[in-house]
Image (spheres, rainbow, N blue to C red):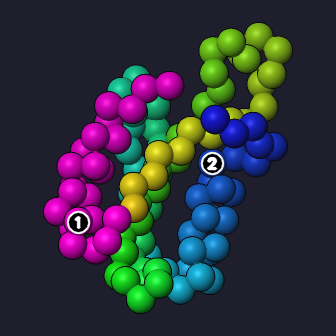
Amino acid sequence: YEPTPADVDFWVGRLRNDLLERGYRLVEEGQVADRAGRDGRWLEFAGNVGGQRVGYLVAIWPRAPFWLWFWDRGNWLQVVEFAAPQAVFATHSAAVRESLRTVRW
C-alpha cells in the first residue's frame, strides 16, 4: 500500500507515461474488479530490457486499509505487478490477468 494525495487516474497516467518514455509499448489496458468488486485498472506493456524482450503487467486499485478508515481518508493504492521474458509472459499473462479478480486487500 502506498499513501498518496493523488487519485488512481493520476497514477495510471503517470505510470503509462513513464513506461512509454522508457521505450515500452502499451499493448492493452482495461478495468478489473477485485474479489470484493472494487474497480481497478490494469496495463500491459512490451519492452526490451538488457537486449531481451519482456512483458510487464501492472494493476492498480484505489483503497485504504480498513484500520485507516477512521482517521486517514487519503488516497491509497494497491499494486500488483507481473514481469517476465516475453515467451514466459505470453504463456502466463492471460492467467495472471484472470487472477487479478481474486486480489484481496
Magenta stretch: includes residue 100: yes
Indicate the quadrant containing the N terminus: top left, top right, bottom left or bottom right: top right
Task: Tell me which segment is drawn in magenta.
Answer: 84-105
Neighbours of disc 2 within 10 Å: few (<14), some (14-19), many (20+): many
Magenta stretch: includes residue 92: yes
Comparing 97 with 56, the one in front is 56
Badge 2 amino acid:
Val
Query: Which residue occupies the extreme left position in the image?
Result: 91
Q: Residues under labels 1 and 2: Cα distance? A: 29 Å
Q: Secondary structure at mark 2?
A: helix
- The residue depicted at 73 percent of the width and 17 percent of the height is 68
Q: Main secondary structure of the magenta part?
A: helix
Left or right, 67 with reference to 29: right
Badge 1 amino acid:
Val
Compared with 49, 12 (above or below) is above
Q: Earlier in the sequence, mark 1 or mark 2?
A: 2
The residue labelled by disc 2 is 8
Estimate the x, y position of residue 105 in percent, counting from the top left: 50, 25
The residue labelled by disc 1 is 88
Comparing 31 with 25, the one in front is 25
- The residue depicted at 46 percent of the width and 80 percent of the height is 49
Q: Secondary structure at mark 1?
A: helix
* Nearest to viewer (mark 1 / mark 2): 1
- State whether residue 44 appears in this view: no
Left or right, 93 with reference to 67: left
- The residue depicted at 59 percent of the width and 58 percent of the height is 12
Compared with 31, 45 (above or below) is below
Neighbours of disc 1 within 10 Å: few (<14), some (14-19), many (20+): few
- The residue depicted at 68 percent of the width and 12 percent of the height is 67
Compared with 25, 12 (above or below) is above
